[in-house]
Image: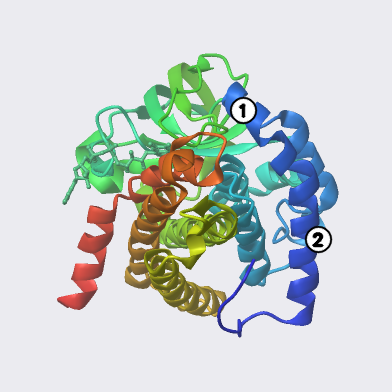
């Protein structure tokens, strides 16, 4: 992937890791994406391969079988290189496991849970999901209705969640329930729910506009008995945990957005050099060159800000507003880049077999999940107006 200015935050070791991810993706992801899109999910085998190659849960301490790598730049390289494949389903689902759900288990899981689940999370035997959204509550999470009732030695949970990434394949889900509905945000707690628990069921993967290789679905809870050891952290603190962890989630989405944008641009530069019109390659029209120059400029500015956020986050200094800026601006940019790249492809850009056609459909949801971009502006404005 062409960078228009030097990257400053990565070392030679990072570059070696990047090459390993790139090689893996070329062999194990890109060739399978079309089949996964038809199946509405990646294969279970692909998760095991990722585990075998050492790309899952690298931050897990060695005592639980991980590599104990706490340098977040490695996690971001993984997301970036998946983005560069242009295969948005895997580029969203795999990092969600590593960098969005796993932190809840690492930060708030009991010792028993960690010993049982972390080795499987690293090997790819256990796939993770996080379930907050409900049919009636998305942006307004405090309005959720699913409940967990304390029955002494266990909880009983009821309700449903929707639009859950990795939902169909997940073996373990972090799920938000109300333990005290009268208390609003302070009545929300997080639990681990295992696939196979009696009363826990999954819907079929949704037929989405894009992200076809992603198994997004509903989850249903009908009097599911959850052991007390599956409460994450303390009762009533779930909303606070979500707010803390969501900053990293937004950086992951922003990283996928800028990386996928880079993939669309590269594919379009190649295409315009080959496609002929009026007896010459369309790359020779001034409009084409100016459009590509504009996109390259905006992408470069986005990349610089992204790298800055990654560095800041690595030092534990990226606040919610800054992560929200990255998520909002780079997902908006991704949609713009996808649209312009479709235009430069002409009719071929509207065909699913072309990366930019798929990208046009895949990009749209990035402005909606992980907090809509309107909610991002709300969070940014709180800092701006403070
Ligand atoms: C493909 C996909 C994958 C997803 N993956 C997951 C997942 O893994 N886990 C999970 O829990 N959820 C997931 N979601 C859900 C996603 O996070 C929600 O869809 C999103 O938060 C928006 O909630 P909503 O759909 O209820 O929309 P609503 O909250 O109903 O919003 C509708 C519109 O109103 C606007 N709006 C709402 N409140 C305000 C406000 N205060 N100020 C200004 N505007 C406002 C919104 O910005 C939006 O434009 C996923 C969704 C999709 C489509």
Which one is nearer the viewer's eye here, 349 or 1? 349
Query: Where's residue 155, x and y in %?
Result: 46, 28
Question: Dot 2: few (<14), some (14–19), or many (≥20) neighbours within 10 Å?
Answer: some
What residue sits 78% from the left and 42% below the top? Answer: 28
Please give the label number shown on residue 20.
2
Residue 121 drawn above or below residue 243 = above
Across the whole image, how many numbered discs are drawn on residues? 2
Ligand 1 is found in the corner quadrant, namely top left
What residue sits 37% from the left and 65% below the top? Answer: 287
- Residue 163: name its quadrant: top left
**Horizontal relation, residue 351 to residue 371: left or right:** right
What residue sits 32% from the left and 70% below the top? Answer: 321
Query: Where's residue 355, x and y in %?
Result: 55, 44
- Residue 297: name its quadrant: bottom left
Question: Dot 1: few (<14), some (14–19), or many (≥20) neighbours within 10 Å?
Answer: many
Which one is nearer the viewer's eye here, 6 or 187? 6
Secondary element under disc 2, as helix, strand or loop, is helix
Q: Is residue 363 visible?
A: yes
Query: Where's residue 182, x and y in %?
Result: 20, 37
Please give the residue where the numbered disc 1 appears in the rendered image.
169
Q: Most extreme residue toward the front, as rendered?
A: 279
Residue 333 drawn above or below residue 10 = above
Mark 2 or 1: in front is: 2
Q: Is residue 191 visible?
A: no
Residue 217 drawn above or below residue 186 = above
**Horizontal relation, residue 96 to residue 384: left or right:** right
């Amino acid at each position: 992937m062409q960078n228009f200015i030097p990257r400053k935050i990565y070392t030679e070791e990072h570059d070696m890791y990047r090459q390993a991810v790139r090689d893996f993706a070329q062999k194990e992801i890109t060739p399978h994406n079309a089949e996964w899109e038809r199946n509405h999910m990646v294969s279970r085998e692909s998760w095991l391969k990722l585990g075998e190659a050492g790309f899952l849960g690298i931050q897990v301490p060695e005592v639980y079988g991980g590599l104990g790598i706490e340098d977040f730049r490695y996690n971001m390289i993984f997301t970036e290189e998946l983005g560069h494949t242009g295969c948005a389903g895997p580029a969203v689902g795999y990092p969600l496991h590593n960098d969005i759900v796993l932190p809840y288990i690492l930060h708030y899981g009991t010792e028993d849970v960690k010993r049982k689940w972390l080795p499987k999370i690293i090997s790819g035997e256990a796939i993770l999901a996080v379930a907050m959204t409900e049919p009636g509550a998305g942006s307004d999470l405090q309005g959720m209705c699913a409940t967990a009732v304390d029955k002494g030695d266990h909880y009983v949970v009821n309700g449903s969640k929707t639009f859950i990434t990795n939902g169909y394949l997940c073996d373990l889900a972090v799920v938000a329930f109300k333990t005290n509905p009268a208390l609003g945000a302070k009545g929300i707690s997080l639990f681990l729910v295992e696939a196979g628990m009696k009363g826990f069921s999954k819907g079929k993967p949704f037929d989405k506009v894009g992200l076809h290789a992603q198994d997004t679905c509903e989850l249903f809870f009908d009097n599911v008995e959850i052991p007390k050891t599956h409460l994450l952290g303390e009762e009533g603190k779930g909303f606070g945990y979500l707010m803390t962890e969501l900053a990293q989630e937004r950086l992951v989405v922003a990283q996928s957005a800028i990386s996928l944008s880079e993939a669309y641009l590269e594919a379009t530069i190649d295409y315009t050099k080959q496609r002929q019109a009026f007896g010459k390659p369309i790359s020779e029209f001034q409009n084409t060159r100016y459009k590509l120059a504009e996109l390259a400029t905006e992408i470069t500015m986005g990349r610089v800000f992204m790298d800055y956020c990654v560095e800041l986050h690595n030092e534990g200094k990226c606040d919610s507003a800054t992560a929200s800026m990255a998520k909002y601006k780079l997902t908006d940019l991704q949609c713009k880049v996808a649209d312009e790249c479709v235009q430069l492809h002409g009719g071929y850009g509207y065909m699913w077999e072309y990366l930019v056609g798929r990208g046009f459909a895949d990009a749209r949801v990035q402005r909606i999940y992980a907090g809509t971009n309107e909610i991002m502006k709300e969070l940014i404005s709180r800092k701006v107006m403070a």
